[in-house]
Image (cartoon, rainbow, N blue to C red):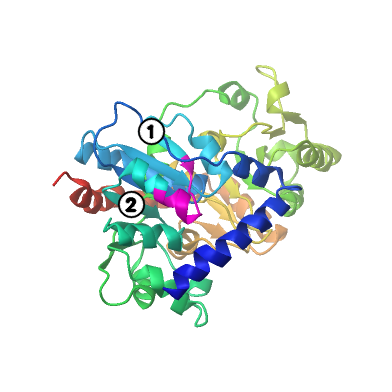
Amino acid sequence: MLSQALYFGLAIPLADLLMRGMALRDPKLKRALRGRRLPVRMDDVAGPGVWFHVSSLGEFEQARPVIEAVRRRVPGAPVWVSFSSPSGLEHSRGYPHAVDTFYLPFRRAHLRRAFDVIAPRVIVIIRYDLWPGLVWEAAARMVPVVLADATLGPDSLRAHPLVRPFQRTFYRHLTHVLAVTEDDADRLRGLCGPSVPIEVAGDSRFDRVWERTRAPCSGALDHAAEGATRPLLVAGSTYEPEERALAEALTMLGGPSEASVILVPHEPTEERLSFAEELFGRLGWGVTRLSRLTPGQPWGVLLLDRVGILAECYRHADWVFVGGSFKGKVHNVMEPAAWGKPIVVGPHYRNSPEAVQMRREGALRAVADPAELASVLRSWKEDPGGAITQGQRARDFLLARRGASERIAEVIAALAAPR
């Protein structure tokens, strides 16, 4: 087909050349190119297995409860996981339920060798990261392909009239699509055509977030919470606009004596930490970093200067303010919801369907500016019972949406079971 010839013969070589040029200045891209290799088959792995493909770390976290549910349903089925992004692959190393984790090959010869190594009985693509070459090669080998946790927004480029004809050349080869919502399913039907079964199965992210609240905590913040003034606000995944808005709102609220704050910058670089230290220090808050905190030390603002424990921070919170929402795109509101915490976000939250729905159901507050943020925090301080009720609504919202992993795994297991 012409589309396959242009994709493998022109688009992939040009993209590879562009990536190598960009890697000269992008360390993350350089790591991705350096780490590319074919998947490995272990001597003790027998029989065809299941190949999961994810874009990055977030999609891998979505895949985990599905992978584990599939392995319960098809005991002994080997699993491989491929990635598009370095951040996902680097955080997945040592994952006990996968034979190997590796970067998805793009060149046709490398892709074919990966198929030969894995010999997949079924391929599962999580969310949206469909690569034409992967689907075309699977179709040529009659390997079923399932698109799970599938989403397609109303403004997605994939559905654009100029792009849709090319998208259809590989979407129509999907074996089964498991959409997050009915709206997603309706839009995906326009790409897949009438021959592809599409049903609504929900979102496995809810299962994964809930699992993480059940896992043992590291205890890294236990001694820190002792030095806090209650109520304790956790500001998660923040950028400079959120930090400025929060500093202004807390000043309106009354200053350091009214609350304590755990501030978790989205990327805790020295530049970002120094900015927050200067901003809150100038306003009279006792600012310290977690790595410098001594047991029992009082503090007003605690800067989290390590990664990987944001969800654990939410466990200790009385209130939660989710970052990205004054910058342009809100970050994960599901983690604090799983802990049953009252959540407030800034004006930019419509990128998150769950944030939109939570606001409709009264499980989340959204504000337009620092003055409104101060007003919400003041209302929670004056009515702690109301704040607790909002947190319970957030938790109920999440619990009502659990179970997608098992529904998805049922479809995959039927295709992966030995025949």
Judging from the image, what secondary structure is the residue with disc 2 in? strand
110 in the magenta segment: yes
Badge 2: how crowded within 10 Å, few (<14), some, or many (20+)? many
Name which quarter of the figure residue 40 lies in: top left
In the foreground, 169 or 62: 169
Give me the disc on residue 294. none
Q: Position of residue 229 (x, y in %)?
A: 65, 31
Residue located 51% across and 40% down the image: 37
Stretch of the chain drawn in magenta? 102-112
Query: Could you tell me how far apart the alpha carbons at marks 2 and 1 are, in whole angstroms?
Result: 29 Å
Residue 65 visible (yes or no): no
Residue located 39% across and 75% down the image: 191
Judging from the image, what secondary structure is the residue with disc 1 in? helix
In the foreground, 372 or 172: 172
Where 413 falls versus 46 (above or below)?
A: below
Where 234 falls versus 184 (above or below)?
A: above
**From the image, which quarter does the N terminus lie in?**
bottom left
Residue located 60% across and 49% down the image: 321
Q: Which residue is mark 2?
A: 123
Q: Amino acid at mark 2?
A: Ile
Q: Position of residue 263 (x, y in %)?
A: 67, 39
Q: Which residue is mark 1?
A: 214
Q: Position of residue 385 (x, y in %)?
A: 48, 46
Is 347 positioned to the left or the right of 188 in the image? right
Q: Position of residue 30 (x, y in %)?
A: 67, 43
Q: Which label sits in the foreground, 2 or 1?
A: 2
Residue located 55% across and 47% down the image: 85
